[in-house]
Amino acid sequence: MSYWQLQLTAFLTIVRKEIRRFTRIWIQTITPPAVNALLYMLIFGGLIGSRIREVNGVAYMDFLVPGIIMMGIITNSYGNVVSSFFGSKLQKYVEELLVSPVSNATILAGYVTGGVARGIAVGSIVSLVALFFIDLKPVYPMATLCIAVLTSVMFSLGGLINAVYAKTFDECSIVPNFVLAPLTYLGGIFYSIDMLPPIAQKLSLFNPVLYMINGFRYGILGVSDIPLWQSFAVVFAFIAILGTIAMVLLNRGVGIKT
């Protein structure tokens, strides 16, 4: 078997393992985000949205749905990798991968692809739920898909970095609860930043999640608070930074090699 055949086989094996992992317990991994999305649409879109009516020239429910879909993609991409990689570290079998002929880049790509698979799966399920509320037809389908996949890649990388440093399962939840959740909820899911005071608008521009949600919203609705090129620029920059950090950590065996 050639070197590249070995890497491909290892990559596909990791991806299959990751996909089987979250599909085997779909009632815990796929169903809850769909139920949460349904509640958000009913409460915020149905009840509160009837009072707000329009945001940026579109119905509030239409404005809300892209943000809810992206929230599901972000949290599940991150959560899948942080829990899976930490579990492999805790059970010591990730060490076997690191000393095998499989490259660290292949290991990283496998786990990230698994995170992307779960993120996009959840995003697709939430989109199906949204069809009960709006006519979901993306204005720019390719832009919608690209920003969704790239955002999923970015947060999958973040999840792996979190898992590398985590020493207990409790530490795996610190970033999602105290960093990721606030950034997501303050990232323009439920409102346009044009509705905020000027100082709050400027502060919001430092929130990277704002760019991803607005990029996704632009792909679906054709309206956004942020130019599409800025959304892609921010996502690519974070992927480059987080990808580099993740590779350095794997190469050095930080938090893994004893």
Image (cartoon, rainbow, N blue to C red):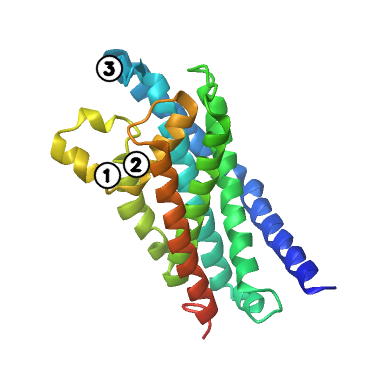
Q: Which mark is residue 93?
A: none
- For label 3, the crowd category at 10 Å Cα-Cα, with few meaning under 14, some 14 to 19 and many 20 or more, is few
Looking at the rendered structure, the secondary structure element under dot 3 is: helix
Instruction: Give residue 100's position: percent from left, percent from top.
Output: 69, 79
Looking at the rendered structure, the secondary structure element under dot 1 is: loop
**Mark 2 lies on residue:** 210
Q: Quadrant of the N terminus?
A: bottom right
- Labels 1 and 2: the sequence-earlier one: 1
Residue found at x 46% / y 53%: 236
- For label 2, the crowd category at 10 Å Cα-Cα, with few meaning under 14, some 14 to 19 and many 20 or more, is many
**Mark 3 lies on residue:** 52
Residue found at x 37% / y 42%: 211
Residue found at x 55% / y 45%: 149
Can residue 79 be seen at all in this image of the molecule? no
Q: CA distance from mark 2 to mark 3?
A: 21 Å
Q: Pointer 1 and pointer 2: residues touching (CB < 8 Å)?
A: yes
Amino acid marked by disc 3: Ile
Q: Within the image, what quadrant is residue 231 found in?
A: top left
Image side of residue 177 versus residue 9, left or right: left
Q: CA distance from mark 1 to mark 3?
A: 24 Å
From the viewer's side, name the closer residue of 73 and 94.
73
Can residue 142 be seen at all in this image of the molecule? yes
Image side of residue 33 versus residue 226, left or right: right
Amino acid marked by disc 1: Leu
Please say if 91 is above or below 207: below
